[in-house]
Image (cartoon, helix red, strand yellow):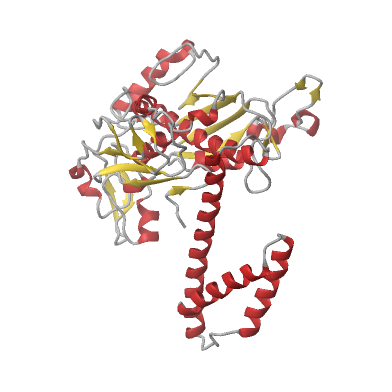
Amino acid sequence: MKSNSYEKYYGITTFGESHGKAIGVVIEDVKPGIEFPFEKIRNALNKRKPGTGTFSSTRKEKDELQVLSGVFEGKTTGMPICLLVYNKDARNKDYEHLKDLFRPGHADFSYFKKFKIYDHRGGGRASGRETISRVAASGLVEDILKDIKINIYPIKIGKFETSQTDLFFQNELSWHDRTNYENLIEYLNNIKNKGNSIGGIVEVKITNIPVGLGDPVFEKLDANLAKAILSVGAVKGIEFGDGFKLAALKGNEANDQMNKNGFITNHNGGILGGISTGDEVIFRFVVKPTPSINIIQKTITKDNKEVEFKSYGRHDTCIIPRIIPVAEAMIKLVLADTLSFQKLISNDKLELADYREAIDKIDEDILIALGRRQKISELIGIFKQENNLQIKNKEREEELLNTLKQKAEIWNIEESLVTDIWDIIISESKKRQ
């Protein structure tokens, strides 16, 4: 499973660790001739980088973007684009006392149990620093999104909630309530001085979104947005429209009734059946407190010994201001992917690059499926050997081939092509058993 890749119509693969040499991303599906949006990406990275706010980590990283390939004379060439940001202010010594224990709230324990090894220097791939790649990649999809507008801001930080939304009120927290902002700052300073951290809730409103985005059954727009947002490390929950409040409503209260002008309400957040209705898409997600805190906590070591420890690294009092550009980046990637697919099924005017992009993704899917099949074939071979079972099963092979021929007829595929592919697949499988 290629878990470090987001591979659909707009595909990216990310790499790098928090305290490694660099963080980067490879983007393979960008059309040629697009003006490379260097400044937009740099501005987005500046909003995400540490050391820029009162309640941000004091790690000083410039996060200067390096373009290694795929761009010539300021324009995309159609070749894979590799973007890189070097880690300049990694202080590995801050994490030496953590190398043999599991930090509460972090991925140390689960990574170690899964991989039998983990990078204790800031969390490695589990660190929020990996999100640099996502933010950088999202800068390449503006031409796909066109008039779609994304508003994203916190509505709750700790015990404070917004009672009004004034988008013209700008500040380092993206907090849009003038009435309690000063009290919120005092509250956060108090938490910071005690070495603690706090979380909150972020609201997203997407406007100018066309009708019909998203597909049944496993490619629903809300499902894909949810996966994208929940893939961000600190996010622990998400709700659309009225969300959990829907549990207390009756059917006639929760349904979005309509008149000739459109929907009267928007309890479902602009998505029905997993497909956008054209109304404003609304959802909220909860962000947990930064798990690294300068307070003594209980945990265990790799040897299962109980210990007490204290983090001494540079941490965010509140991660929300830095998570906002990351969430926005993931939303852009999801929408770009959905819009690209919708363009295909809507019979919109397509260019050669659109057709090539579609067939390239199908080819990738075929390769991924073949790779998985080979791995399973190996496991089948091991299982048969351990249980003294016959390796070859001629009857089953013939039965499967006949089934494939029947399906090929439905899809108007030549029987000879299916037979040739099947012979190759079986031949490869036998080599691995």
Residue most extreme to the left:
93
Which residue is more in the foreground, 333 or 52? 333
**Residue occupying the point 25% across, 32% down:** 59
Asked if residue 425 is positioned above or below residue 161 in the image, the reply reads below
**Residue occupying the point 49% across, 14% down:** 177
**Residue occupying the point 45% across, 39% down:** 30
Which residue is more in the foreground, 297 or 411? 411
Q: Pinpoint residue 428: horizontal percent, then vertical percent.
A: 49, 74
Apparent side of residue 201 relative to residue 77 in the rendered image (left or right): right
- Tell me, yes or no, if residue 70 can be seen here: yes
**How many labels were placed on the picture?**
0
Q: Pinpoint residue 11: horizontal percent, then vertical percent.
A: 47, 44
Apparent side of residue 278 relative to residue 305 in the rendered image (left or right): right
Name the quadrant containing residue 138. top left
Q: Pinpoint residue 100: horizontal percent, then vertical percent.
A: 25, 55
Asked if residue 96 is positioned above or below residue 340 in the image, the reply reads below
Q: Pinpoint residue 361: horizontal percent, then vertical percent.
A: 53, 50
Apparent side of residue 273 relative to residue 113 in the rendered image (left or right): right
Asked if residue 306 is positioned above or below residue 204 in the image, the reply reads below
- Tell me, yes or no, if residue 291 can be seen here: no
Which residue is more in the foreground, 157 or 80? 80
Apparent side of residue 102 relative to residue 9 in the rendered image (left or right): left
Which residue is more in the foreground, 401 or 114? 401
